[in-house]
Amino acid sequence: FALVGFGQNCEVRNISVDGAGLTTSRGFSGSLGGYVYLCKAANCTDGGFTAGNHVLCEATGCSAVAAFNSSTTCYGCTAHDNTFTGFVSGILVKCVASNNTGASSDGFSFTLNGSSCINCVAYANGRHGFIFSPVTSARVYLFVNCLSVSNVSFGYSSPAFDCGFLNNCAAFGNATNFDTDI
């Protein structure tokens, strides 16, 4: 169940939720037109934040589903110390994914067409820093001023025919900094 649910054109501010001890929990679940500001989701098994727009939010200790899952927009958000991927798709600006552990824990994973990542950092995640993995045919992704550091596998990975545009992006200290398909 969702600890905090919200509808379109609603705002949620300054709330901290903790799913510890619950069998299934999602921190914040809403519609694409809703806004969440300065909120924290901890220990949620079904994602910390799903749908909506998130500003200066934090997700930590989340498992089984990405901390920020299919968010419309995230600005200044952090996903850290989760046992799953930090961010999945959306328009992400000034976000940080760090110390997300697990063999398949990426900092940022992109599956939706038109996703963008601007001024974001992937640091010390369990697999890739940034991965472009389309569900269907070629997708277009835009990355500007992003940094991938000390991730277990690739800094930037593209396992299929993707159209990932990297502009002024850097990587170092990863097992492999840039996938040859990029």
Image (tube, rainbow, N blue to C red):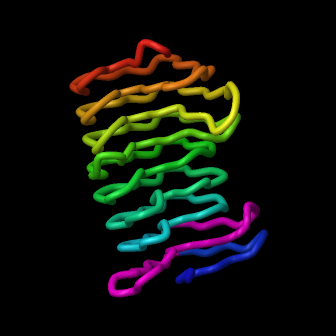
Give the residue at x 51% y 57%.
Answer: 68
Residue furthest to the top:
180
Which is more toward the observer, 131 or 142? 131
Q: Is residue 135 above or below residue 100?
A: above
**Whole-percent x, y for residue 72 in the image:** 66, 52
Quarter of the image holding residue 11? bottom right
Give the residue at x 26% y 50%.
Answer: 99
- Residue 44 is a magenta residue: no
On the rendered image, what quadrant is the N terminus found in? bottom right
Quarter of the image holding residue 122? top left
Give the residue at x 28% y 44%.
Answer: 126
**Whole-percent x, y for residue 159 in the image:** 49, 26
Q: Is residue 94 left or right of residue 103?
A: right
**Whole-percent x, y for residue 114 in the image:** 69, 34
Quarter of the image holding residue 12? bottom right
Which is more toward the observer, 45 or 145? 45
- Residue 21 is a magenta residue: yes
**Whole-percent x, y for residue 84 in the image:** 38, 56
Magenta region, residue range: 14-38
Give the residue at x 25% y 35%.
Answer: 152
